[in-house]
């Protein structure tokens, strides 16, 4: 990869970075290489883009300089695991809710069928036709909803 900036600017930037790194090493008494120090500096820059470096996550008086970094990794991993567990619990709740909704819809269908039988016994004229039309439309909507739920479940 060719750098997009001209070489003199890049050299000046690297010199500035190296002086900053040496100052950081002196302040934190790091006995590590520039590489780990640079990693720490990047970490500090991400955490605290402006502010005092002493409040940052740089390890103080740790030989390798990676103690704080590995601790942060462990904390992040633990947080991710907790989030996954919460998601699983939510999925179970959703499944229960779906089952309850389906049972309620089935009960409604059963009630509708009971009404049909009562209507047939009564034998009312126009009201009966209107009810049948309503029930047909409700049944069609119900079937569409159940098909949509089945499609969603397959995905």
Image: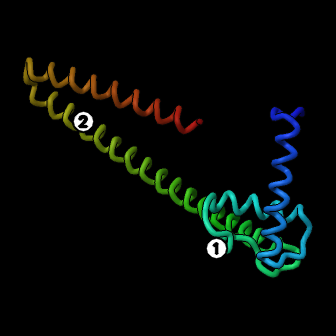
Q: Badge 2, how many Cα within 10 Å: few under 14, some, many 20+? A: some
CB contact under 8 Å: marks 1 and 2:
no
Q: Nearer the viewer, residue 24 or 71?
A: 24
Q: Is residue 18 left or right of residue 52?
A: right
Q: Residue at x 10, y 24 (%)?
A: 123
Q: Quadrant of residue 78?
A: bottom right
Checking the image for residue 55, the label placed there is 1
Q: Is residue 67 left or right of residue 95?
A: right
Q: Residue at x 58, y 36 (%)?
A: 154
The residue tagged with tag 1: helix, strand or loop?
helix
Residue at mark 1 to residue at mark 2: CA–CA distance: 69 Å
Q: Quadrant of the C terminus?
A: top right
Q: Nearer the viewer, residue 146 or 78?
A: 78
In this rendering, the answer to whether 39 lies above or below 12 is below
In this rendering, the answer to whether 2 lies above or below 12 is above
Q: Nearer the viewer, residue 55 or 16?
A: 16
Q: Is residue 90 left or right of residue 58?
A: left
Q: Quadrant of residue 17?
A: bottom right
- How many numbered tags mark residues here? 2
Marked residue nearer the N-terminal end (1 or 2): 1
Q: Residue furthest right?
A: 33
Percent of width and height locating residue 111: 24, 40
Q: Residue at x 16, y 25 (%)?
A: 131
Q: Nearer the viewer, residue 12 or 50?
A: 12
Percent of width and height locating residue 104: 33, 46
The residue tagged with tag 2: helix, strand or loop?
helix
Q: Quadrant of the N terminus?
A: top right
Percent of width and height locating residue 46: 67, 57
Percent of width and height locating residue 67: 80, 75
Q: Residue at x 14, y 30 (%)?
A: 119
Checking the image for residue 112, the label placed there is 2
């Amino acid at each position: 990869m060719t750098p997009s900036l001209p070489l003199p600017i890049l050299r000046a930037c690297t010199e500035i970075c190296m002086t900053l790194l040496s100052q950081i090493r002196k302040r934190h008494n790091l006995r590590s290489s520039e590489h780990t120090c640079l990693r720490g500096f990047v970490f500090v820059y991400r955490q605290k883009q402006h502010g005092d470096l002493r409040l940052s996550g740089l390890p103080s008086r740790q030989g390798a300089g990676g103690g704080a970094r590995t601790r942060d990794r462990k904390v992040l991993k633990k947080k991710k695991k907790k989030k996954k567990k919460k998601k699983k619990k939510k999925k179970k709740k959703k499944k229960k809710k779906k089952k309850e909704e389906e049972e309620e819809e089935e009960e409604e269908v059963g009630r509708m069928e009971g009404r049909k039988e009562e209507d047939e016994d009564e034998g009312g004229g126009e009201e009966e036709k209107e009810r049948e039309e309503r029930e047909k439309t409700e049944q069609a909507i119900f079937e569409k909803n159940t098909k949509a739920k089945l499609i969603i479940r397959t995905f």
